[in-house]
Amino acid sequence: MFAQHLLTLRALACTLPLLLSLASPAVRAAAPEPPLRLYVLDCGHAEFTDFRAGSDTGELDGKPATLADPCFLVRHPKGWLLWDAGLPERLPSSVTGGVAHEDTLRRLGFRTWVERPLVPQLQALGLTPGDITHLAFSHLHFDHVGNANLFMRATWILDRRELAWALASPAHVSMDKALISGHRTARTLMIDGDHDVFGDGSVRILHAPGHTPGSSVLLLQLPKAGAVLLSGDLYLSLEGRAHRHVPAVNADRADTLASMQRVEAIAQRLQARVIVQHDPAEFDRLPKPPAWLE
Ligand SMILES: [Zn+2]
């Protein structure tokens, strides 16, 4: 009887580590890491009396347009990425040539406005700018970097060619170096093409030059929505995507067309949802906080 107990104890002693080793992954699995989420924030709007800048082949000459200017917040188990930082509160004088903000529609044919500052939108999600761990931009035009300098604790992921172009003198149209001055003191990660933000393939920056030399799009693999592509300014509207309009304000037409071809091929292969960032109808359709896309 005693010997039998001893055998049982020995068997237990042998199997216990095995049982524990089998159990521990199950214990870990009981507390899963939070899944990837995409929040869409309202980072401003623009209105044009004549949107000829939207296409260099004349289709939009004389036609009015409104544009949305969202920021996108990606929650990943390893951190928070802000993709694009929206419009500044006031148009920079480097863009307006000194025309008063209130007078830009009459004098320049367009105006921009910010209805909801970014910080309260982050606070509504329980975040402060200091919680954003990664900051990346589709490109560095003023309407995508307006709030960039708020995020001095984030790693700024910058395309090397894009930054060099943005800092060139004299400044290119639609650029305002002051809006990205934080790059000088923030932690930066310079990239030279595609980049896997969190190292697991779920959040990838794809090089899509043309609109500017270092323009890019963001490819997400969301658990339920599947592949989602954020367009940056590769397209300015759904109509622009359908007809492959190349904006009149654009660095390299051939590069833009090649980038459209690449991004469309990837979107088709992955059956991705392409979100045209500036399109107001697209913006209206997207879920807004506290809702998200996952
Ligand atoms: Zn833009």
Image (tube, helix red, strand yellow):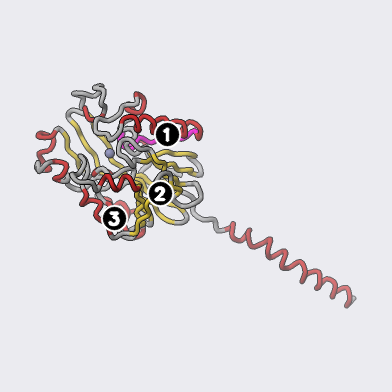
Where does residue 112 sit, x and y in percent of width and height? Answer: 19, 40
Mark 2 or 1, nearer chain start? 2
Residue denoted by label 3 = 183
Mark 1 burial class by Cα count in 10 Å: few <14, some 14-19, many 20+: many
- Ligand 1 picture quarter: top left
Rounded to the nearest whole Å, what is the CA distance between mark 2 and mark 1?
Answer: 20 Å
Q: Are marks 2 and 1 in contact (CB under 8 Å)?
A: no
The secondary element bearing badge 1 is classed as: helix
Look at 84% across and 75% down and name the residue there. 6
Q: Is mark 2 within 8 Å of ligand 1?
A: no
Q: Which quarter of the rendering shows the N terminus? A: bottom right
Q: Is mark 3 within 8 Å of ligand 1?
A: no
Where does residue 65 sit, x and y in percent of width and height? Answer: 23, 30
Q: Are marks 3 and 1 in contact (CB under 8 Å)?
A: no
Mark 3 burial class by Cα count in 10 Å: few <14, some 14-19, many 20+: some
Q: Which residues are magenta?
A: 271-284
Residue denoted by label 2 = 74
Residue 273 on the magenta span: yes
Look at 36% across and 29% down and name the residue there. 257
Q: Residue furthest bottom?
A: 2
The secondary element bearing badge 3 is classed as: helix
Up/down of 269 relative to 86, above or below:
above
In this rendering, which labeled residue sits more in front, label 2 or label 1?
1
Left or right relative to 260: residue 23:
right
Q: Where is residue 32, by image quadrant?
A: bottom right
